[in-house]
């Protein structure tokens, strides 16, 4: 087994390598002055089972090209199997035609990854589960819910009596219900909102009882942070005792950490390390990270050993 790390999230890749007792293989991945990506695998990979670890976060297009070109290099070097380990799958929000003459970019990216040489894909909390069907190769979509469950129990010292799990929209109810079930079947609430445009939303109503409850908002992506902060404020206006957010992928674009810090309603934002935290995010006292390195390392180990991955979804 070989582990190849792209430049998008070196820290997570190294952590996965430590848990597998497998050092990262030597590879040079750099960008020329005109923006072209160059990759050279500096170890023999002929006949090897290779895992390329690369999130397609900001800069999304550069990181995607690194992933594609790295897999092409491995394919031409006669690797026996190439697994694209993509902790955060970019373009996942473009999973359908949202309007006339618009692309389905998630399908296009899936085609590119397959064409570049991937034999398998391993990812975490896809924005939409149907994206698995966009790939014509085996695709495992892992869930970070166990890591969030563990952290919520720690924060409440095991007493979950006053906890309510909140879905930030109707489309996220299934995801929120999974966390609520793991937290001893806690009650569920839903934020009913109307989206006014890309990245903008207006909170309209709270469905469910949140008065006097410690609310946990659970979602897959936080981008600008505006919707999250609005939802937290709406919950507090309805009498919630506190609001904590558990979001798998902390995109946090456009200095979203400042919005989180200024929000009087949001007590804490917990994200995973699927996207490497930039300096402003890492230094924000309201934002903390839980690691998915153990989850990904175990999945990689099972795939390499041809063992079942199904139990990781339980």
Image: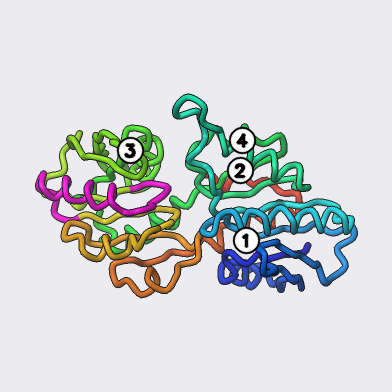
Query: Between disc 1 and disc 4, whose residue precedes?
Result: 4
Please check the rendered image and state whether residue 125 is part of the magenta-colored stretch, yes or no. Answer: no
| Residue to which mark 3 is pinned | 197
187 with respect to 63 (left or right): left
The residues tagged by marks 3 and 4 sit, at their Cα atoms, a distance apart of 23 Å
Q: Whole-percent x and y of residue 54?
A: 62, 59
**Residue drawn at the location 55% of the way across and 55% of the way down:** 60
Residue 297: assigned label: 1
Q: Which residues are magenta?
A: 218-242
Query: Between disc 4 and disc 2, whose residue precedes?
Result: 4
| Residue to which mark 2 is pinned | 310
| Residue to which mark 4 is pinned | 107
Kindly check if marks 3 and 1 are in contact, taking CB atoms under 8 A apart as contact: no
The residues tagged by marks 3 and 2 sit, at their Cα atoms, a distance apart of 38 Å
The residues tagged by marks 1 and 4 sit, at their Cα atoms, a distance apart of 27 Å
Question: Which callout, 3 or 1, points to the residue nearer the camera?
Answer: 3
């Amino acid at each position: 087994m070989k582990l190849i790390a792209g430049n998008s999230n070196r820290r997570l890749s190294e952590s996965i390598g430590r848990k597998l007792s497998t050092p990262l293989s030597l590879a040079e991945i750099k960008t020329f002055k005109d923006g072209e990506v160059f990759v050279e695998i500096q170890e023999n990979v002929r006949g090897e089972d290779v895992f390329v670890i690369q999130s397609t976060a900001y800069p999304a297009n550069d990181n995607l090209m690194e992933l594609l070109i790295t897999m092409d290099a491995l394919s031409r070097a006669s690797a026996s199997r190439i697994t694209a380990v993509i902790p955060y799958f970019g373009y996942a929000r473009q999973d359908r035609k949202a309007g006339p003459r618009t692309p389905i970019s998630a399908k296009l990216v899936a085609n590119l990854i397959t064409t570049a040489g991937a034999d398998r894909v391993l990812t975490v909390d896809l924005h939409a589960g149907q994206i698995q069907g966009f790939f014509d190769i085996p695709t495992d979509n892992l869930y970070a819910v166990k890591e969030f469950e563990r952290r919520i129990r720690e924060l409440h010292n095991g007493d979950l009596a006053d906890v309510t799990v909140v879905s930030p929209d109707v489309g996220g109810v299934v995801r929120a219900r999974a966390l609520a079930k793991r937290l001893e079947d806690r009650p569920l609430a839903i934020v009913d909102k109307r989206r006014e445009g890309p990245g903008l939303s207006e909170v309209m109503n709270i469905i469910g009882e949140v008065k006097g409850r410690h609310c946990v908002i659970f979602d897959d992506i936080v981008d600008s942070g505006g919707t999250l902060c609005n939802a937290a404020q709406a919950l507090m206006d309805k009498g919630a005792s506190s609001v904590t957010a558990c979001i798998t992928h902390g995109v946090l674009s456009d200095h979203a950490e400042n919005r989180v810090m200024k929000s009087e309603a949001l007590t804490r934002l917990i994200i995973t390390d699927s996207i490497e935290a930039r300096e402003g995010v890492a230094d924000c006292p309201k934002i903390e990270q839980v690691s998915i390195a153990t989850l990904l390392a175990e999945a990689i180990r099972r795939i390499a050993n041809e063992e079942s991955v199904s139990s990781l979804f339980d």
